[in-house]
């Protein structure tokens, strides 16, 4: 069943602690701004509320190990690392992204009430805003999720944050990977529950998870940006659920889970090859080889 909550309501109902405002504002200003690809292309800190929720859930559930699919610039990572440093000094946050820790990216940030931009690595950004007590909890893993998981040995994970590939098959893969890596009991938080082209979280939650298990949809778009700009007509938020590993794997079928993960690994291998090729020969990005081959057959 899908249970819907406003963020403030959810925080109060579950007695979730939120971070100190001045420190949190510093993180928002330094890491939460980005340029919207849709709407009016403005630079905004849209959905900074996810940081409040992530911090609060880590403080509430005290996981020993966290796995994050999709680091991006690391706003969510550092919100979790901050909370982890306060509840479990020996805890670990494993975070996976195909963009390297030392790879330079375009970065927007707010300073003196003005939006600025610069080219910087995630490593530099983190060192500027996060104390060493936070960073020592973070283990950065570079690559695509399925490949990274297959090549690394993880301890049992008690908390997962899924915010990497947003298309349905990719989200389902990260969910099934989470089940295989889960402790006997764990928690999963999905970002980007929204009706939007090429986004698959809502489809997975509505059709395959919430019909079998309780899922909390926490709305985090207080400004209604996505609805006001005609991007979606649906609720927008994050989905949280408690996982009993044996029950979930039995429900989805252990053989079905293994088969799906194996199939997605093959797909991801082709994706990695194509993206590597695109980086070396940029004009190939515009060519759909499947269509080209069909036209010559």
Image (cartoon, grey):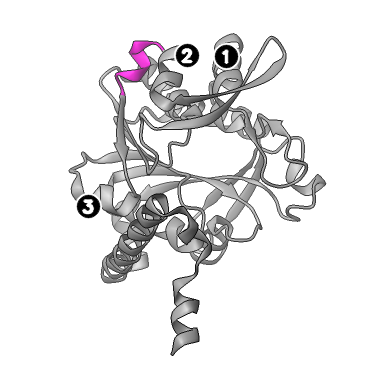
Q: In this view, does 127 lie to the left or right of 205?
A: left
Task: Please tell me in which quadrant of the rendered image residue 131 appears.
Answer: top left
Helix, strand or loop under label 1 = helix
Query: Which residue matches tag 3?
Result: 150
Q: Do the CB atoms of the residues marked 2 and 1 lie less than 8 Å apart? A: yes
Residue 205 seen from this side: yes
In the rendered structure, which segment of residues is drawn in magenta? 131-137
Identify the disc placed on residue 26. 1
Q: Which quadrant is the C terminus positioned in?
A: bottom left
237 to 22, vertically: above or below: below
The mark nearer the N terminus, 1 or 3, is 1
Q: In this view, does 231 lie to the left or right of 166?
A: right
The mark nearer the N terminus, 2 or 1, is 1
Q: Which quadrant is the N terminus positioned in?
A: bottom right
Helix, strand or loop under label 2 = helix
Please tell me which residue lies in front, 264 or 216: 264
Residue 88: image location, x then y, percent: 31, 20
Q: Residue at x 45, y 13 (%)?
A: 128
């Amino acid at each position: 069943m899908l249970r819907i909550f406003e963020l403030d309501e959810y925080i109060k109902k579950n007695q979730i602690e939120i971070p100190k405002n001045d420190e949190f504002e510093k993180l928002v200003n330094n890491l939460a701004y980005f340029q919207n690809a849709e709407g009016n292309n403005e630079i905004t800190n849209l959905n900074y509320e996810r940081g409040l929720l992530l911090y609060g859930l880590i403080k509430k559930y005290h996981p020993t190990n966290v796995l994050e699919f999709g680091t991006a610039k690391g706003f969510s990572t550092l919100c979790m690392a901050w909370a982890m440093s306060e509840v479990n000094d020996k805890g670990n946050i494993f975070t996976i992204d195909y963009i390297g820790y030392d790879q330079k990216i375009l970065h927007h940030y707010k300073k003196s009430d003005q939006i600025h931009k610069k080219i910087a690595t995630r490593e530099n950004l983190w060192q500027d805003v996060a104390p060493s007590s936070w960073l020592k909890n973070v283990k950065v893993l570079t690559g695509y999720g399925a490949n990274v998981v297959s090549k690394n040995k993880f301890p049992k994970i008690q908390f997962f944050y899924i915010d990497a590939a947003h298309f349905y098959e990719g989200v389902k893969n990260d969910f099934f990977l989470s089940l295989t890596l889960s402790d006997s009991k764990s928690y999963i938080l999905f970002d980007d529950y929204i009706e939007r082209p090429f986004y698959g979280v809502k489809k997975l939650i509505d059709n395959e998870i919430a019909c079998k298990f309780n899922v909390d949809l926490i709305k985090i778009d207080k400004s209604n940006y996505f609805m006001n700009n005609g991007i979606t007509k649906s609720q927008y938020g994050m989905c949280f659920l408690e996982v009993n590993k044996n029950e979930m794997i039995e429900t989805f079928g252990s053989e079905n889970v293994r088969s799906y993960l194996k199939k997605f690994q093959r797909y991801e291998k082709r994706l990695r090859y194509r993206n590597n090729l695109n980086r070396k020969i940029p004009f190939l990005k515009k060519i759909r080889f499947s269509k080209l081959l069909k036209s010559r057959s």
